[in-house]
């Protein structure tokens, strides 16, 4: 079996472009004893990958040039020489950006019986869903009746954050990047209030939806959203810091919020987190979230690109607002 | 009895000046039933008072013009019509900036038997000492063997932070504003490393003292110290945000740290706190700190001004580096 794969040809400066990537075709070997041959059916691209394209020290090692990129993928075992895997098994791996791979079982996770479409296990039932779940409930210590503001609310993480808040009997306010996304948040997902951040006046718009202020600000974007939120926090508020998408493409350091001193008087907690360090919560997450998804209480949307060759465009689209919900590349 | 008192004549812009204050003399009434007449013996001025001189919403109400300022004070009861107080009792109050007052017992705290000089109860055994204690141990969740960096390390709070760290078998690194203060920290107080922040290269200087990085950054100053510390934090580090003295006199918003996104990858927690919300720890604090002070394990210094009329100068001196340790006004 052949696998077409995407590699980085040079490190992007600012917004990535198609020329930063190339497609190569490799011949997959036959699986040896203890190995499986997997054909990917669904891939994901995520904003955090932009950080790994830079050559600097980070909490995950950087991507290397002229090596196949990696990322979340759902695949099916097509040939197994491993006693734990059978042909047809669905597996989750980090070997995305490619059509298939041969691997020892290390780094694979068997998904068991699928209770939702495969791609859902890359989104609402995968890392983004779990990021929302632990970020809001564990890092954010959300309590019943509180008010949540989430930026990037139409994204895979943000839309789950707002809906989990509603399920927990809290108020949900979200910001997004278009009128259609704003409509989606309030009409389809049940957010109490949403606004388009392009309209400016972030602080006023937050307070329109949350006149009494915010208890939890789930920060997906950093920058001026964080600064505005810091002016709207209630005493003892929590700010899970999940990502800083507005800064991923910055080529110079971005000034931080000029009102961080608010954290003192209002006793705020800003807490960065990485979802992979909350694995002890995985069983709770899968149980709750699967139930919410199946019952229709928690909805999700995907933006689907078709074919491995569309993966760079899907990735670039993350930074130009091309997606609503999880960005998926379907390999059919 | 007469009391000379200090009032604010106008709101300071930038660094306060003597012209922002005036001294008035008032006639104290005789204490009625349930009241006491107190003569202050020791007053304190603190950086946080600068914030209260501004006319804006804050966690403590602002000072009013042409009213006597308030602040920590230790006094002696000279006449009592209250059954709980006797002549000669020492009391702690917030009725500083004046020579004496008549008061119902509300807001007074009896100090019991003094085990240290009266002024110590305004410093190492008072609010600054307790700020260091709960900020480091509760907010900072300090663990044995960790490394602490504290800015403003020669101040009343900072010097206690470093010494508590040492008592807890941790490494202590501090920054201060003069070579003499740096010498004091390492030679007198047992800090492992200290440096003068005027020498620049904050990050390099922190790492000289803590090559493996910092577990707890106790932030007394904000600004470029916070930004430098954010580049030196170890994974899961904690940053108690205690004050932002470098910003108290700023007339425009100061840009925040441009590297706050480090908090995500390194899972850092920045947590603002107000000491008065940790009153449940007061008994622990008084027990531990008194023992450490009496045994000589925890040293403190005071800068003493004499006479009520020197109080404005003492206060202004907080922002010009005039003090080492707690700034005290002795009313003899």
Image (spheres, coloured by chain):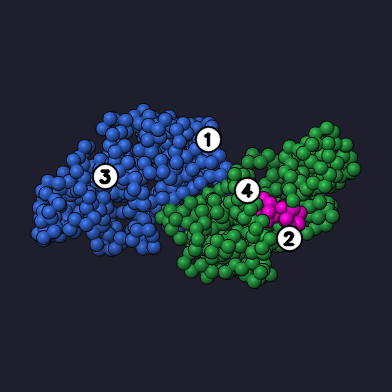
Chain colours: A green, B blue
| Dots 4, 3 in contact, CB < 8 A | no
Per the model, the C-alpha gap separating discs 1 and 3 is 33 Å
| Mark with earlier residue (2, 4) | 4
**Residue bearing the label numbered 3:** B122
CB under 8 Å between discs 2 and 4 = no
In percent of width and height, residue B295 lies at 28, 30
Left-right relation of B49 to A162: left
Chain identifier of the residue bearing label 4 in the image: A
Pointers 4 and 3 within a single chain: no
Task: Look at mark 2 in the image and give the residue it sits on.
Answer: A302
Residue A242 % position (x, y)? 60, 52
Which of the two discs, 1 and 3, labels the residue nearer the N terminus? 3
Marks 2 and 4, how far apart at CA: 24 Å
Question: Which quadrant would residue A330 be assigned to in this image?
Answer: bottom right
On the same chain: label 2 and label 4? yes
**Magenta-span inclusion, residue A270:** no
Residue A128 counted in the magenta span: yes
Identify the residue shown where x is 34% and y is 58%.
B60
Q: Are marks 1 and 3 in contact (CB under 8 Å)?
A: no
The magenta segment is A114-129
């Amino acid at each position: 079996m052949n696998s077409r794969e995407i590699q980085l040809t040079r490190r992007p400066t600012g917004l990535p472009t198609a020329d930063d990537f190339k497609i190569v075709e490799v011949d997959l070997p036959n699986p040896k004893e203890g190995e499986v041959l997997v054909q990917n059916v669904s891939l994901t691209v995520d904003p955090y990958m932009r950080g790994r394209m830079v050559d600097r020290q980070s909490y995950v090692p950087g991507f290397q040039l002229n090596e196949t990129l990696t990322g979340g993928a759902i695949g099916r075992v097509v040939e197994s020489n491993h006693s734990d895997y059978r042909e047809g098994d669905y597996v989750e791996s980090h070997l995305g950006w490619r059509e298939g791979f041969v691997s020892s079982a290390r780094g694979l996770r068997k998904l068991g019986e699928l209770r939702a479409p495969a791609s859902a296990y890359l989104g609402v039932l995968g890392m983004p869903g779990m990021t929302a779940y632990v970020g809001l409930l564990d890092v954010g210590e959300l309590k019943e009746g509180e008010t949540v503001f989430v930026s990037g609310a139409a994204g895979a993480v943000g839309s789950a954050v707002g809906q989990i808040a509603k399920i927990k009997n809290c108020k949900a306010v979200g910001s997004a990047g278009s009128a259609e996304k704003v409509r989606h948040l309030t009409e389809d997902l049940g957010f109490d209030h949403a606004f388009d951040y392009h309209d400016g006046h972030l602080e006023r718009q937050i307070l329109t939806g949350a006149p009494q202020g915010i208890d939890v600000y789930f920060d997906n974007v950093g920058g001026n959203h964080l600064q505005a939120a810091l002016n709207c926090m209630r005493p003892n508020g929590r700010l899970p810091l999940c990502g800083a998408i507005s800064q991923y493409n910055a080529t110079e350091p971005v000034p931080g919020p000029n009102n961080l001193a608010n954290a003192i008087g209002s006793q705020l907690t800003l807490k960065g987190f990485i979802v992979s360090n909350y694995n002890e919560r995985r069983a709770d997450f899968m149980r709750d979230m699967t139930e919410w998804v199946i019952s229709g209480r928690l909805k999700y949307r995907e933006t689907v690109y078709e074919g491995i060759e569309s993966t760079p465009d899907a990735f670039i689209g993350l930074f130009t607002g091309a997606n609503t919900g999880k960005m998926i590349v379907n390999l059919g």
